């Protein structure tokens, strides 16, 4: 069951990343960006680096962070150092609790492609899925190796997001492999009607009503 996310004063996930960085120590925005990159946060969440300063300003505006000092090195522009406030800590912990406990519907480009796969022939769909499977399996092997290497030095607490991403990737490999197997063996339900549609452009009666109704499983 998908949950409804709370409306937050600064809802951009970069704000979550910034707050998590400032829990460690006060920083100026350049340091924040460096720390977030070092920790691979741009791989764990969608981050637009160009919005960093705007996010920092909005966090300060809403009292979640505050300027603690200004520094200047040589002829460089003055840099403002920010620290997290008590309100910011409360927001961070509440946000993390929500994200951990509440499932949300997340859309992907692959889901979009699957939803309109009928415009291709079964054979072409199978060929393309085979290409995807090869790429996924190659990427999966690399991720497993990288995780195993990192686990030698990094505590598991700081790798659980990588474990999750690996599990998701493994699940996708399993799904694609299964779907590909059905298409290549001809056991995919309705494949004959799909083939007719691909060859003639005419929707078989067996599928016409369903396509007209836009039948889709109802979300709980």
Image (tube, rainbow, N blue to C red):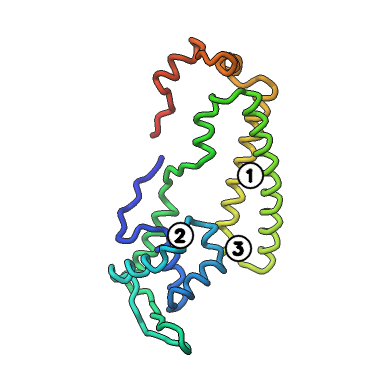
Per the image, the residue denoted by label 1 is 170
The x, y position of residue 167, in whole percent, is: 60, 48
The x, y position of residue 97, in whole percent, is: 40, 57
* In this rendering, position of residue 1 left or right of residue 197: left
Report the Cα–Cα distance between label 2 and label 3.
27 Å
The answer to whether the residues at label 2 and label 3 have Cβ atoms under 8 Å apart is no
Mark nearest the camera among 2 and 3 is 2
Per the image, the residue denoted by label 3 is 156
Q: Residue at x 45, y 44 (%)?
A: 106
Q: Residue at x 66, y 30 (%)?
A: 180
Callout 2: 10 Å neighbours few (<14), some, many (20+)? few
User: Is 218 rendered above or below residue 7?
Assistant: above
Mark nearest the camera among 1 and 2 is 2
Quadrant hosting residue 182: top right
Looking at marks 1 and 2 on the same chain, the residue that comes earlier in the sequence is marked by 2
* Mark drawn on residue 48: 2
Q: Secondary structure at mark 2?
A: loop
Query: Which quarter of the rendering shows the N terminus?
Result: top left
Callout 3: 10 Å neighbours few (<14), some, many (20+)? some
Looking at marks 3 and 1 on the same chain, the residue that comes earlier in the sequence is marked by 3
Q: Outermost residue toward the front? A: 75
The answer to whether the residues at label 3 and label 1 have Cβ atoms under 8 Å apart is no
Callout 1: 10 Å neighbours few (<14), some, many (20+)? some
Give whichever of 165, 196 is nearer the camera: 196
Q: Residue at x 53, y 34 (%)?
A: 113
Q: Residue at x 61, y 67 (%)?
A: 155
Q: Secondary structure at mark 3?
A: helix
The x, y position of residue 195, in whole percent, is: 60, 17
């Amino acid at each position: 069951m998908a949950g409804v996310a709370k409306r937050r004063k600064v809802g951009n996930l970069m704000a979550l990343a910034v707050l998590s960085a400032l829990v460690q120590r006060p920083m100026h925005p350049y340091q924040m960006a460096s720390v977030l990159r070092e920790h691979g946060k741009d791989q764990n969440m969608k981050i637009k680096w160009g919005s960093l300063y705007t996010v920092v300003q909005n966090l300060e505006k809403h009292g979640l962070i505050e300027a603690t000092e200004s520094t200047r090195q040589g002829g460089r522009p003055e840099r403002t150092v920010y620290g997290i406030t008590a309100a910011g800590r409360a927001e961070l912990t509440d946000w993390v609790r929500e994200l951990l406990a509440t499932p949300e519907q997340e859309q992907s480009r692959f889901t979009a492609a699957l939803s309109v796969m009928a415009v291709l022939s079964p054979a072409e769909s199978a060929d393309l899925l085979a290409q995807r499977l090869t790429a996924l399996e190659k990427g999966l092997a690399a991720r497993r190796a990288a995780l195993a290497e990192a686990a030698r030095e990094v505590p598991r607490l700081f790798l659980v997001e990588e474990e999750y991403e690996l599990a998701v990737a493994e699940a996708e490999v399993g799904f694609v492999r299964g779907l590909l197997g059905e298409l290549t063996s001809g056991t995919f339900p309705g494949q004959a009607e799909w083939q007719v549609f691909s060859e003639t452009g005419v929707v078989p009666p067996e599928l016409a009503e369903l396509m007209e109704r836009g039948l889709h499983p109802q979300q709980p």
